Image (spheres, rainbow, N blue to C red):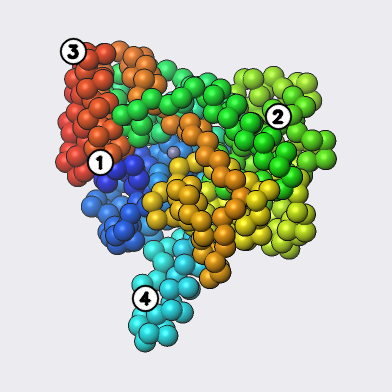
Amino acid sequence: MRITSHGAAGEVTGSCHLLEVGRKRILVDCGLFQGNEGDYTRNAAPFAFDPRSIDAVVVTHCHLDHIGRLPLLAKAGYVGPIYATQEAREIGRLILMDAAHVMLEEYLGRKRKAARQGREVEPPPYGVDDVMMTVDLFQRPVTYGSPVSLGDGVSFTLRNAGHILGSAFVEIEEKRGGGRTIATMSGDLGYRGRAVMPDPVAPSECDFIAVESTYGDRPHRPVAESRDEFANAVKEALASGGNVIIPSFALERSQDVLYYLHEMWEAGDLPSDVRIYLDSPLAIGITRAYERHLKALNPKLVAGLDRGEEPFEFPGVQFTSTAEESRAINRFESGSIIIAGSGMVNGGRVLHHLRHNLWRPNCSVIFVGYQARGTLGRLIVDGANMVRIFGEEIAVRASVHTINGLSAHADRQGIVDWLRGSGKAHVHLIHGEPNALETLAAAVRSELGREVTIAEPLVPYEIRPVE
Ligand code: ZN
């Protein structure tokens, strides 16, 4: 067995790994590069392998940095199967369609601007048609714990990674000459003790385990602390008599936020006439997927179902799909909690809500996710007095709260503890920035006494059975 990582070492996007197992070539994830200059070129560049030579694609989960280049793979001639859980298939379709629409809008904007300067621009890397072609390749859904045979003594099993709905880590097994070798790919690993997702299950004993290292260099605070801080920020914000804006990512964070509000509702911590808007068509679509698969969520949430609880659509919650419904939210000057994208405030409906509320001292903005440098969200978090929205200067007078620790990723200790289940497996670190990779490597060596390597892009690593 041999693994080659295509662009996911030293960074946390563009996850894509080629495993050569006997005569089979298996691709685990095919993600988009995001968040850095030059990503457009990297995403549009041809693959370093021949897409037609791949026998199967296995998807760990449907964040864009794990599936965003699948349409490019299909466009480049891949016609084989794509395997994922049922939940991941449903979310994948929504995420890829949305990505194609966002790319098209960006392109039309750039094109108009370039035309005025007499220039031409590159078309988007893929469109809706390519996404349709990709979605057609999704196979019969894979169930956690049920092996799927790829022939020639090669099979794989998905197990619940507890990261987002439908997320999995993959155990790939090769049987040859009476022996067997198992290689495990972590995908993204969840953080233990979260509200909506269950904890990740332990890996089986294996020979090789590639593990994500996003937060390999730091601890998270306990989830309960962040939930309390969030609840207090909401109560304080509503008490000041204005509206509350929560910029949020559509996948996973919006469902977490709705569920924390649900807990507040059940505890009697929200006014009985509160209006909570989920104002994002993508987040609404994804929340409906969560609602179709409630039994797959955290056992505590599932227990609430038996008591008749509605974890995401409890009284007061409204899903606003159309632009008209979204605009209508602005007629209320107080008592609304508005969850809208984009999570980093660099586009989306949250912009028009901020234009209406950011300058009003009795309103509040609660950030629940990381704000990258260069985004409007980051400017507000960093204390700007004035920001530009739709070409207009808007004063920042609303109170601004930042809730850290609502991460969907395991922290350093979480990763190390998860690795214990893998027996004596060789540990191969992927999907992390340089400092996270180095720090995690040191922790795995000292705490588990394992051999550790750090993936280098495009450099194959030979997987050998442990003695
Ligand atoms: Zn992820």
Q: Choose top left, top right, bottom left or bottom right for residue 122.
A: bottom left
Q: Residues within 10 Å of mark 4 (few under 14, many from 20)?
A: few
Tag in front: 3 or 2: 2
Q: CA distance from mark 3 to mark 2?
A: 53 Å
Decide if residue 223 is on the left or right side of residue 316.
Answer: left
Question: Of helix, strand and loop, which one carries label 1?
Answer: loop
Compare marks 4 and 3 and give the one earlier in the sequence: 4
Whichever of labels 3 and 2 marks the residue nearer the N terminus, that label is 2
The residue that label 2 is drawn on is: 264
Q: Secondary structure at mark 2?
A: helix
Q: Nearer the viewer, mark 4 or mark 3?
A: 4
Q: Which residue is identified by label 3?
A: 467
Question: Which quarter of the frame holds ligand 1?
Answer: top left
The reply, left or right, for residue 406 in relation to residue 415 is right
According to the picture, the residue beneath numbered tag 1 turns out to be 10
Q: Are marks 1 and 3 in contact (CB under 8 Å)?
A: no
Residue lying at 38% horizontally and 51% vertically, measured from the top left = 373
The answer as to whether callout 4 falls within 8 Å of ligand 1 is: no
Dot 2 beta carbon under 8 Å from ligand 1: no
Residue in the image at 60% along x and 45% along y: 399
Q: Amino acid type of disc 1?
A: Gly
Gap in angstroms between the C-alphas marked 1 and 3: 30 Å
Residue 445 or residue 122, whichever sits in front: 445
User: Which amino acid lies under the numbered mark 2 shown in the image of this protein?
Assistant: Met
Q: Secondary structure at mark 3?
A: loop
Of callouts 1 and 2, the N-terminal one: 1
| Number of on-image labels | 4
Question: Residue 200 appears at what percent x and percent y?
Answer: 47, 23
Q: Which disc number belongs to residue 121?
A: 4
Q: Give the quadrant of the N terminus.
A: top left
| 347 is higher (above) or lower (below) than 271 | below
